[in-house]
Amino acid sequence: MAQLGMFDNARKVFDEMLERDCARTVLSFNALLGACVKSKKFDEAEGLFKVLSKELEIEPDLVSYNTVLKAFCEMGSLDSAVTLLDEMEKKGLEPDLITFNTLLNGFYAKGRFVDGERIWEQMKEKNVEPDVRSYNAKLLGLALERRMEDAVKVVEEMKSGGIQLDTFSYSALIRGFVNDGDLKKAKHWYHEIGRSGCKLDRLTLEGLIPFALQKGDFMFAYGICKCVLCSKLPVQNVLIQSVVDVLAEKSKIEAATELVKLGDAHHAYSLEIK
């Protein structure tokens, strides 16, 4: 609700600026656009950009374009985003890393890998160096395509370029190998993230736990749950309970009991041995 009210407040302040003898500049215009996108009023952002800027004779700058690009990508209007990119360049505005990362995230995440690669090539042509967010977008795209060998090559490219993997990098790899049905490699990257000091996100863990059980590696599932409980990560209670149930069924009562005790200790989980 706070985010929804953010735009209304921003618009009120923007509209009152003239009464307060404050000039409405591209900076205040960008602040209004930003509040609009953060409030997820993406259609309205496009309207402000196209109509209000002309009414007030405000010339949008790079920040303005990047903000509306984000709105288009969030809406899934990726072709409109590319058109806007072309418009930027015609106006003499050079796209930056934020521009390209916004587009890469949009295309790769929507399964439009070929188009994502086209944007990647444009980024290279403009001599804009990719960062970890750029690579994470590509890793996600490769994971969705189930091209995990290529994803591992991208990781090697990152390492050779001195770019450290983060939580999102590891999550993309683990989810990709889970979707590919490869427990051995999913386990490898799970242990790698432990060594890196990064933390796994909830969605990745919630995919990895049932996958480990499905593959019959209930002790690996137990290890994940123990880590979750000790780290107080917010994973669904039913998933931890499913591991407790399997451990009890396999006569691993000591391990099952340990998970129940850990759940009780942190007051976040209601677990029991049935």
Image (cartoon, grey):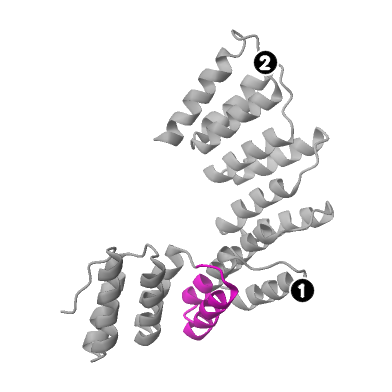
Left or right of 103 on screen, residue 88:
right
Query: What span is colored magenta in the figure?
Result: 174-199
Q: Is residue 182 within the magenta segment?
A: yes
Tell whether label 1 touches label 2 (CB within 8 Å).
no
As displayed, is residue 255 above or below residue 266? below
Residue 20 x %, y %: 60, 10
Left or right of 44 on screen, residue 268:
left
At 62% from the left and 60% from the top, the residue drawn is 137
Quadrant in which residue 136 is drawn: bottom right
- Kindly give the residue lying farthest to the bottom in the view shown: 251
Quadrant placement of the C terminus: bottom left
Q: Secondary structure at mark 1?
A: helix
Q: Across the whole image, how many numbered discs are drawn on residues?
A: 2
The amino acid marked with disc number 2 is Leu
Q: Nearer the viewer, residue 253 or 187?
A: 253
Quadrant placement of the N terminus: top left
